[in-house]
Image (spheres, rainbow, N blue to C red):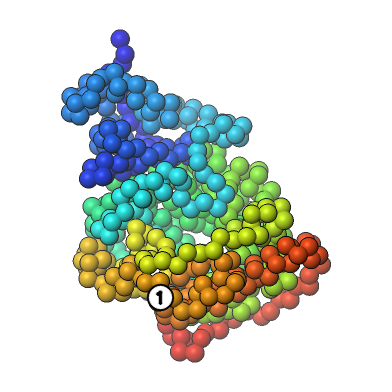
């Protein structure tokens, strides 16, 4: 006789949308996401409602949903295989054994996950978003808990960041939300369909109630993603692992201590960060290494690839550096890669937005189709909450829609004329964008446009700069023009760094 009672593992979380009859479930140890529809989704909804380590009965589900028991039993067998159900109660020993088995499977390339290099969403997430998208439903939120940070990265875009050790930090000037504020906000967002919460800063572990917020999200079945430099996690990795984050994203700028530490302006920071990565991977926690490439690490960024290989971690390289949200343009003026440097770096197929003969398809970027409607998910199914409660479409797109401390989420999204205009963008409203040949090579960040012009649809210099360099490189490669592939042949110029504001932005935070 088949076992009737199963248990929901503590490493799972997800969301069921009863109106659309769809569900998504995350297996955070095996690092896989699964999308379900119709009857399967309805069953998943009941499994999720049982809670972690909760009992789930084949008979009860069959009776509630009027589905044949044999069908439910077969479905349960598949869920056990995916690590989404267990035929027995799960002990600490079982969890440790499962972590080790999944870590070994990833090392040997046998996992079932659908994660690809530089992908923000898995196929399961895309399918779920497409199924549930409407203007009252939110899929993901980023909580910028604080702008305070224990590092002083010279390229940081947070308000108040310093460019050298002599400047006075202004990171702590913004009044931060309380724990009660966050609980109320999380409750509202969960009622609106929240599936994923990204926790960032500044450095999120510099916020006093970080662990209480992680615990609250975990108990709400929200998938958790952490952005951190890892420094304040020293000694606390086992504690974080118990919350089974979907992934932890950690910045590493170089495998050379002097280069990485020179960017963070904190001696010994690389060693601490790598120690934390090693511990996280030991718990089978998914680690994504973020490596923005600037003039200070351009000659050694490839050393990060070795780090990714050692720790079996994905790496996201990014050559697009953005200016500070408070108007400081020092990053693009002094740290953005030069055209000569970009010609070399963009030929690396591990770079997001590369243009390389090693990947012939990359020479022909798809022409963007200009259509009505918001051109990205920001402000549609994705939002960001600033430390003071301001609701914005994205952490890189700081158009304030309202304040979550003073207004309810649904009141904001229904009353904000800015949000309404953004969601109903018309193709004819674009200014200059998509009118040049090089526009086909643009990855189009509306935040860059907004930060420069106060208008997300007016072409920003930073977007155009990257598009022009990609286009130029593509034309050279297609015409068999000899292009340098050795960054060592390019002279580096280190400029003195200090805050440099656009006119009228000097006091803006």
- At 78% from the left and 70% from the top, the residue drawn is 490
Is disc 1 placed on a helix, strand or loop? helix
x%, y% of residue 245? 43, 45
Q: Is residue 255 placed above or below 503 in the rendered structure? A: above
Q: For mark 1, does the 10 Å Cα neighbourhood hold few (<14), some (14 to 19), or many (20 or more) residues? A: few
Visible in this render: residue 487? Answer: no
Relative side of 326 to 269, left or right: left
Rendering quarter of residue 349? bottom right
Q: Is residue 267 placed above or below 114 in the rendered structure? A: below
Rendering quarter of residue 124? top left
- At 30% from the left and 50% from the top, the residue drawn is 132
Q: Is residue 119 placed above or below 21 in the rendered structure? A: below
- At 43% from the left and 26% from the top, the residue drawn is 81
- At 39% from the left and 63% from the top, the residue drawn is 378
x%, y% of residue 482? 81, 65
Q: Dividing the image into 4 quarters, which one contains the N terminus?
A: top left
């Amino acid at each position: 006789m088949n076992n009737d009672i199963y248990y929901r593992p503590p490493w799972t979380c997800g969301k069921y949308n009863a109106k659309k009859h769809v569900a998504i479930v995350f297996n955070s140890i095996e690092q896989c996401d699964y999308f379900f529809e119709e009857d399967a989704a309805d069953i998943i909804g009941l499994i999720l409602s049982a809670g972690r380590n909760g009992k789930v009965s084949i008979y009860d589900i069959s009776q509630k949903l009027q589905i044949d028991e044999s069908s439910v039993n077969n479905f349960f067998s598949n869920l056990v295989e995916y690590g989404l159900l267990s035929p027995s109660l799960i002990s600490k020993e079982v969890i440790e054994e499962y972590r080790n088995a999944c870590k070994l499977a990833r090392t040997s390339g046998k996992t079932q996950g659908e994660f690809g290099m530089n992908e923000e969403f898995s196929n399961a997430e895309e399918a779920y978003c497409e199924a549930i998208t409407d203007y009252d439903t939110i899929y993901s939120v980023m909580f910028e808990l604080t702008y305070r940070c224990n590092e002083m990265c010279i390229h940081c875009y947070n308000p108040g960041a310093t460019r050298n050790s002599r400047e006075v930090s202004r990171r702590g000037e913004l009044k931060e939300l309380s724990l009660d504020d966050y609980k109320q906000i999380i409750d509202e967002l969960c009622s609106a369909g929240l599936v994923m919460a990204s926790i960032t800063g500044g450095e999120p572990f510099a916020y006093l109630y970080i662990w209480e917020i992680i615990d609250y999200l975990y108990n709400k079945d929200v998938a958790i993603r952490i952005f951190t430099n890892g420094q304040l996690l020293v000694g606390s990795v086992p504690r974080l692992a118990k919350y089974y984050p979907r992934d932890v994203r950690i910045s590493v700028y170089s495998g050379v201590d002097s280069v990485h530490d020179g960017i963070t302006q904190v001696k010994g920071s690389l060693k601490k960060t790598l120690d934390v990565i090693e511990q996280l991977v030991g718990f089978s926690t998914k680690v994504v290494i973020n490596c923005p490439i600037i003039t200070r690490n351009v000659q050694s960024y490839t050393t990060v690839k070795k780090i990714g290989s050692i720790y079996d971690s994905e790496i996201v390289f990014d050559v697009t550096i953005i200016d500070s949200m408070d108007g400081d343009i020092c990053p693009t003026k002094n740290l953005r890669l030069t055209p000569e440097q970009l010609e070399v770096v963009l030929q690396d197929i591990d770079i997001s937005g590369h243009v390389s003969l090693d990947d012939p398809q990359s020479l022909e970027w798809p022409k963007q189709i200009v259509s009505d409607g918001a051109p990205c998910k920001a402000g549609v199914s994705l939002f960001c909450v600033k430390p003071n409660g301001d609701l914005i479409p994205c952490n890189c797109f700081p158009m304030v829609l309202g304040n979550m401390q003073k207004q309810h989420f649904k009141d904001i999204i229904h009353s904000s004329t800015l949000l309404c205009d953004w969601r109903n963008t018309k193709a004819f409203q674009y200014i200059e964008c998509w009118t040049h040949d090089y526009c086909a090579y643009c990855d189009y960040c509306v935040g860059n446009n907004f930060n420069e012009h106060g208008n997300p649809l007016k072409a920003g210099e930073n977007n155009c700069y990257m598009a022009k360099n990609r286009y130029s490189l593509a034309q050279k490669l297609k015409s068999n023009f000899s292009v340098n592939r050795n960054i060592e042949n390019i002279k580096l110029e280190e400029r003195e760094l200090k805050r440099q504001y656009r006119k009228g932005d000097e006091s803006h935070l």
